[in-house]
Amino acid sequence: MADSQTTSWTAAWELLLPTAAAPPRRRGRVLQGALREAVRSGRIAAGTRLPSSRELAADLGVSRGLVTDAYEQLTAEGYLSSSRGSGTWVSGAAQAAAVRGHSRPVADGAPGSGFLPGSPDLALFPRAAWSAAHRRVLARLAHSGLGYPDPRGLPELRAAVAGLLTRRRGVVADPECVVICSGVAQAMTLLGFTLAGLGHRAVAVEDPGSPEHTALLSAAGLTAVPVPLDAEGVSPAALAASGARAAQLTPCHQFPSGIAYSARRRLELLQWARAADGLLVEDDYDGDFRYDRAPVGALQGLDPARVAYAGSVSKSLAPGLRLGWLVLPEQLVDLVVERKRTMDLGNPTLDQALLADFIERGDYDRQLRRCQRAYRERRDALVAALTEHFPGTEVTGIAAGLHVIARLPRRYGPEARFVERAARAGVALRPLADFAHRPGHDDGHIRLVMGYAHLSLARIAQAVALIADAGARGLPAATR
């Protein structure tokens, strides 16, 4: 495989990891969806030769037949091409068709990224303020500060983060219980290995929920046990029946449903943790972005001894900074710090000093206000466009975060065909079903998880108009 092809395949590899962690009956669907999205988005470049079905099956820990079926399905759909003796390749024609008009891609990022959730607007990164902080920090940083860092994190950053979280999120944050890490992904990995070392074998996860968390827990040797949600949050009865003594949650703005856990449900979950001698792991992935009323306070503030709290600057500044934090129950701090020490010896000192300066001078709060204004405006634009182009659409989860759930009327279905038509129009969409661990009841509605933060107002309007036009082509002529 050529170097460029190897690079392309390596860049897309992480998208396939959730396959092995998915329930057996869903692995084929998960693999097909991940490969399809990798081709659409350009993460696997046109002309890339894919591993053989035997190699990929061995790498993912799944059956060869499952991989063969996925390759055959995507070949039939036109995403891949194959010939006897030559292997399987990414079709150039498929990627060319993924975006309508190369001069004006629908997304403000990679062509074809469309309404995919999870991405902030990287153009909002405060370059001037960050550059000024860089100069200040370098001017005052002692030579000794460039030595090996404390794996817990720079003391001034831990103090700044503790103050920030106490003030903005209602977290009970002693700087001695704060550990700086490389984003929430590393935070979950550190906790996963720590829990495994304490004898845990399983962690309950929300269903629907983030496939990435399932993959991270699996990498730490833990089984992710999906627990269903109701209108108030994770079901306590199902959690008790899961057999797990730890649960990973997004209680302030559940991903992807958008609900906020009710006060009653929060107390029930804390009661479960105390009775089971368990731990709740709170991922506050976008807790600062609430638009219509004050943010919901963190669950951790109700019982710091039973909740580990994780957050980062990935949505507020940029994911490429790889800066996040864990606020831990006191009894877990030393165990997590030792795992952090063996994992990477600690985060870069200069980056930590920069963030500490940024927080202490008030620049971080200004950045949050700037993002909140921009994202609220974009949310409103998306809701208005959906109302205009898709009458009868129900939009939920709009009070906070960077995405909404849109339930389109049945007449635009079936869902898979609608998503395919949108992709051919140049707009990538993610059905809510992609985030479910178990297949749900299909009532004929199309349910989409639509991220909007990375799109300009003009692009939001353009993209909704495109999918409306594409969706109308699937309707009977009399209903258009």
Image (cartoon, rainbow, N blue to C red):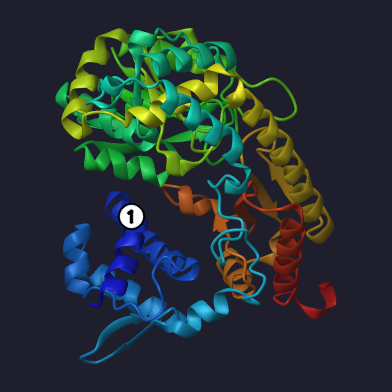
User: Can you see residue 14?
Assistant: yes
| In the depicted structure, whether residue 382 falls above or below residue 368 | below
* Residue displayed at 39% across by 25% down: 325
x then y, percent, for residue 372? 69, 33
**In the drawing, does residue 306 fall left or right of residue 311?**
left
Closer to the camera, 49 or 232? Answer: 49
| In the depicted structure, whether residue 298 falls above or below residue 59 | above
Name which quarter of the figure residue 224 lies in: top left
10 Å neighbourhood of mark 1: few (<14), some, or many (≥20)?
few
Closer to the camera, 275 or 328? Answer: 328
| In the depicted structure, whether residue 478 falls above or below residue 24 | below
Dot 1 falls on a residue whose secondary structure is helix
Name which quarter of the figure residue 253 lies in: top right
Closer to the camera, 445 or 129? Answer: 129
x then y, percent, for residue 101? 65, 77
Q: Which amino acid does the dot numbered 1 rest on?
A: Glu
x then y, percent, for residue 186? 32, 35
